[in-house]
Amino acid sequence: MRVALGSDHGGFELKQEIIKYLEEKNIEYKDYGCYSTESTDYPIYAKKVAHGILDGECELGILVCGTGIGISITANKIKGIRAAVCTDCFTAEATRLHNDANILALGGRVVGPGLAVKIVDTFLNTPFSGDERHIRRIAQIETE
C-alpha cells in the first residue's frame, strides 16, 4: 500500500507525526506538500492528494489542515473521492467499513498526535466491508 499525504500549514506538524508512524510501520507514502509551517492554501494539497489516488499513484490518502474540514470539503468535490473527517477510531473504522472512504482528514488543531496515529492506524488497517447495502449507497453518492 502507498499512502498519499498532504497538509496545509495548520496540519504540517501533525503530518510530520504521521510520517514518523508510517516510516516505523514501513508503509510507503508520497508527500504532496506542504513542506513547512509557512501560510499556504489547503485546496492545493487536497487536490494533489485526490489526484494521486485517482491516478493510481496511491491507494489511500491522509489530509491534514487546522480542522480537517476545509481540506476534506475540497477533496470531496473531486469525483471518486470520499474524504472523511475523523476525530476518533470508531469513525475511522466505520468510514472504511461502510463508506469505503479513500481519504482520512484530520485537524491538526483538533486531534493530538497520539490519538491521530491511532486513528491513522485504524483507517489504514480497516478494509471496506463490501456489503451490498454499502456498495449501493456509495453508488448513490457518485451519481447526481
Image: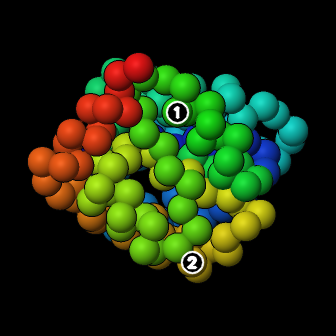
Label placed on residue 2: none
Q: Position of residue 49 (x, y in %)?
A: 50, 33
- For the point 12% across and 48% down, the residue is 132
132 to 42, vertically: above or below: below
The residue positioned farthest toward the bottom in the image shown: 114
Q: Nearer the viewer, residue 120 or 27?
A: 120
Dot 2: few (<14), some (14–19), or many (≥20) neighbours within 10 Å?
few
Q: Secondary structure at mark 1?
A: helix
**Which residue type does callout 1 highlight?**
Asn
> Could you tell me which residue is drawn at 33 percent across and 49 percent down?
99
Q: Of marks 1 and 2, which one's residue comes earlier in the chain? A: 1
The residue indicated by pointer 1 is 76
Q: Amino acid at mark 2?
A: Leu
* Mark toward the viewer: 1 or 2: 1
On screen, 7 above or below 125?
Answer: above
Evaluate if marks 1 and 2 touch, with contact meaning CB atoms under 8 Å apart. Answer: no
The residue nearer to you, when weighing 35 against 112, is 112
Mark 1, other Cα within 10 Å: few <14 / some 14–19 / many ≥20: some
If the image is split into quadrants, where does the C terminus sit? top left
Q: Looking at the picture, how far across and down is residue 90, in whole percent? A: 42, 74
Expressed as whole percent of the image width and height from the top left, the position of residue 71 reads 65, 40
Please tell me which residue is depicted at 87% across the width and 38% down the height of the picture.
39
Left or right, residue 102 beside residue 14:
left
The picture places residue 87, in percent across and down from the top left corner, at: 58, 68
Q: Is residue 29 left or right of residue 5?
A: left
Residue at left offset 67%, top offset 70%: 111
37 vs 79: above or below: below
Helix, strand or loop under label 2: helix
Give the number of the disc on residue 115: 2
Whether residue 2 appears in this view of the structure is: no
